[in-house]
Image: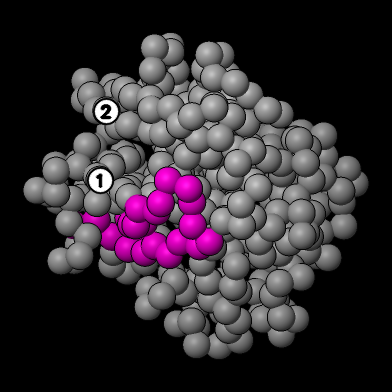
Amino acid sequence: MRNFPLVSVTVCQPSSGAQTNCATIDNVLLDTGSFGLRLYASAIPASTLAALPVQTDPASGKNVAACGAFGSGYTWGSLRAADVKLAREVAPAVPIQVIGDAAIASPAPASCVWNTALTSPAVLGANGILGVGVARYDCGAACTRPTPRTGYYYADTAPATPISLPLASQVTNPVALFPVDNNGVIVDTPAIAAAGAPKATGTVIFGIGTQTNNQLAGAGATVLATDRWGNFKGSVGNGSTVPTFIDSGSNTLSFEDWSIIQDSGFYVPATPLKRAVALSDTNGVNGTADIIIGNADAMFASLNFAFSTLATFLAQTVDLGMPFFYGRRIYYGIEGTPSGAGATGPYVAYLSR
């Protein structure tokens, strides 16, 4: 998979201090555009899976099924609890989704189905998704109300029935549950050659303004307030100002520009093109960044897997995917948490390396 950042995640029996019935799951997609950990049941050893209790719906007594929606498709599975260990940080008793879990008998309802069914690691290209964006919960307050919101949580009945859940029971960004370094993440990725690279290695740093290596104050970064989903405003070139986000889970730069030649939705200019991106937030902060659009056909013909110039057409939205990360340090401040730099989440910030 091209421009597909992968990390390792350790899950253990909940409330064990990440010491009991643990398993390290490699090749998990790092996704700054979603919130919470979702692993395929097939990627978790049976002994570890058995140690992760399934959440039940008090009203029906049935197991709780979770739905996850992404640009590429949807996930369907159980809601379990696990201690989640990322590097040396441990988040206790985190509600996670286990995709394709046999503990859920009902199929995904129509209100969950979207685009492609991400039913296996082979379909997704990874053993799961680690969502570390700006929100604490994948749904939030909208799923706590008496009238259940569709598309998130269901009782495992026939058919599956939407239910409401308290915040503490919802799929949760594990970073928000760390004892320290819990106010956000930084994704730091080196620049790569314009023609691409066989691979690229970056660093995920936990916390913002909590350690010497994660300072935002004085760094010179552009800080943009976002909504709880990580959206702000942006435009590319002379395009319209539209909803914009910075997302490591997207493998291209995606925006609307009818002047660039396309091939199956990918931009394929004869020579590389430079575009200025104008970014703004609701606080009146404005920023700019430059992107380069290369020929996708030439990239796909190479043996490289990391590209900073891979771009696609997307109407009425600017998605600054993984190509935007190369050569930059990107910050994600979790909602409701201060950074010590005058910024309180949710926000994103970016800084050229």
Graded by Cα atoms within 10 Å as few (under 14), some (14 to 19) or many (20 or more), the crowding at tag 1 reads: some
* Residue in view at x 14 percent, y 43 percent: 220
| Label of residue 288 in the image | 2
Q: Quadrant of residue 201?
A: bottom left
The correct choice, above or below, for 43 with respect to 331 in the image is below
Residue at the extreme right: 158
Q: Do the residues labelled 2 and 1 touch (CB within 8 Å)?
A: no
Q: In which quarter of the image is residue 49?
A: bottom right
Question: In the rendered image, which residue does mark 1 sit on?
Answer: 352
The secondary structure making up most of the magenta span is loop
Q: Is residue 192 magenta?
A: yes
Gap between marks 2 and 1, in whole Å? 11 Å
* Residue in view at x 58 percent, y 28 percent: 267
- Which numbered disc, 2 or 1, marks the residue that appears first in the sequence? 2
Residue 353 visible in rendering:
yes
Image-based side of 269 in relation to 340, left or right: right
Measuring from the top left, give residue 42's x and y in whole percent: 76, 70
Amino acid type assigned to the residue bearing label 1 in the image: Ser
